Image (cartoon, grey):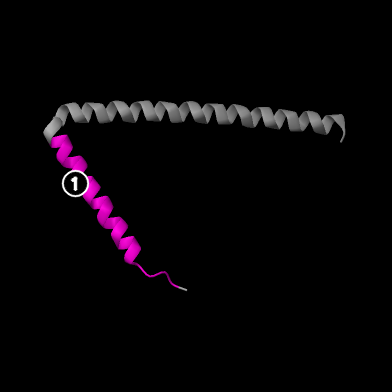
Amino acid sequence: MKESKLIELKNRVEGLSNVVKNLIHEVHSCISMSQGTLTALQMHLGKDEWAKIVEELKNIEERQNKEKKLEIPEE
């Protein structure tokens, strides 16, 4: 390969690396914000109400999983 082509490829890789680093930073920011929001909601609702909601969500998830298992895939 020509040196100019290698330099171009190196620059592209560095650019993509920077994009990935920025995306990782954004994901960490989103995680932090969502955890803070969940904590605030838990504190607002209280322990008992939060436990009821979590249990209800588990039941919904179980029902959906059972329905998926019952579905017959089309051939």
Find the magenta span and give its range: 49-74
Give residue 65's position: percent from left, percent from top. 31, 56
Q: Is residue 3 left or right of residue 30?
A: right
Left or right of 51? Residue 10 is right
Q: Position of residue 48 (x, y in %)?
A: 12, 34
In the picture as drawn, the residue positioned furthest to the right comes out as 2
Residue visible at 34% across and 61% down in the picture: 68
Q: Secondary structure at mark 1?
A: helix
Tell me where residue 70 appears, x and y as whole percent: 32, 66
Residue at 16% x, 28% y is: 44
Going by the image, does 15 lie left or right of 60? Answer: right
Which residue is denoted by mark 1 in the rendering? 56
Q: Is residue 70 magenta?
A: yes
Q: How many marks?
A: 1
Residue type at the position of mark 1? Glu
> Which residue is rendered at x = 30% and y = 62% of the image?
67
Q: Residue furthest bottom?
A: 75
Left or right: residue 21 compared with residue 41:
right
Instruction: State the image quarter where residue 16 is shown.
Output: top right
Q: Is residue 59 magenta?
A: yes
Q: Quadrant of residue 42?
A: top left
Q: Is residue 44 above or below residue 69?
A: above
Please state which of residues 56 and 29 is positioned toward the viewer in this rendering. Answer: 56
**Viewport quadrant of the N terminus:** top right
Question: Magenta stretch: dominant SS?
Answer: helix
Task: Tell me the crowding category of disc 1: few under 14, some 14 to 19, or many 20 or more residues within 10 angstroms, Cα based.
Answer: few
Q: Residue at x 46, y 28 (%)?
A: 26
